[in-house]
Amino acid sequence: MEAVSTPSDQFLPLQVDLANEASVREAVQKTQETFGALDVIVNNAGYGIGGSIEELTDAETRTSFDVNVFGTLNVIRAVMPYLRQQRAGHIINIASIAGFAANTGWAIYGASKFAVVGLSEVLAEDVKEFGIKVTVLEPGAFRTQFLTKESLVFAQNAIEDYQAIRNSHAKYAAMDGVQQGDPERAAEVIVQVAAMEQPPVRLFMGSDAYRRALQKLEIVRQDLETYQKLSFATDFQ
């Protein structure tokens, strides 16, 4: 990850290998030394990966988790000593609506984002005694480069049988450039969330994400009611 700009007293460009814990710690230390405090940490690195579990190799799957999950964990581990000492700070992890309601053909991507959502929800509880806030953002489709080849990869060994997955990938490819979400408005919302005294632990971003979340909640509700007796059947009598 590299940010290119002119260094100033308000901007510090750093090149960081998020999968390398030492590289992350060095970057965090330089940031702390330069600005004297860490106020808001946004974990935004990640990429999409499409394919069935059978199609994606162990290496492809682990690479996805290295960036989407372990990169986030590396940053959190590196910043927490500073935030605890300050008794203040706000960690914002960007997941996806796929981390709550994943779609056909995105099992590994969904799994990595489910992990980010889960660790964020528990982290929020673990660090609140230190005055540290945690928010996980679950955006829908935004008009960014996410659906381009620079940010999205597919299984190298596609299996012909998985036609539903190919159809799903084609549907997403057709969305590129016409997504509902406005990235500039998303940035404004993130700034707004960062300034809140009591920010949400989880925030679905975009009307599409909101609708998918509601649909998932209804499915879960129906399953709970339909199989209540079966759920309770495991209790000691």
Image (spheres, rainbow, N blue to C red):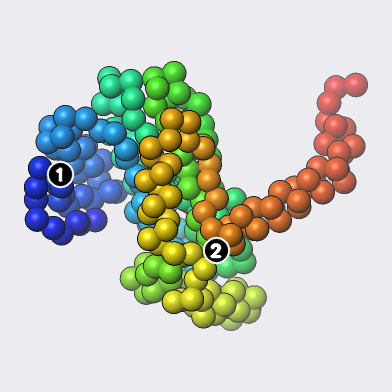
Q: Residue at x 43, y 35 (%)?
A: 196
Q: Residue at x 26, y 26 (%)?
A: 82
Label located before the other in sequence (2 or 1): 1
The reply to whether residue 70 is visible in this rendering is no
Left or right? Give the position of 86 relative to 5. Answer: right
User: On the image, numbered disc 1 is attached to which residue?
Assistant: 10
Q: Residue at x 30, y 26 (%)?
A: 83
Quarter of the image with the C terminus in it: top right
Q: Is residue 26 above or below residue 153?
A: above
Q: Which quarter of the figure has residue 107? A: bottom right
Question: Residue 52: x and y, percent?
Answer: 56, 66
> Is disc 1 placed on a helix, strand or loop?
loop
Q: Is residue 128 above or below residue 23?
A: above
Tell me the amino acid under the disc marked 1. Gln
The reply to whether residue 199 is visible in this rendering is yes
User: On the image, numbered disc 2 is attached to which residue?
Assistant: 106
Q: Residue at x 71, y 56 (%)?
A: 215
Q: Nearer the viewer, residue 99 or 135?
A: 135
Question: Residue 189: x and y, percent?
Answer: 43, 50
Question: Residue 62: x and y, percent?
Answer: 41, 54
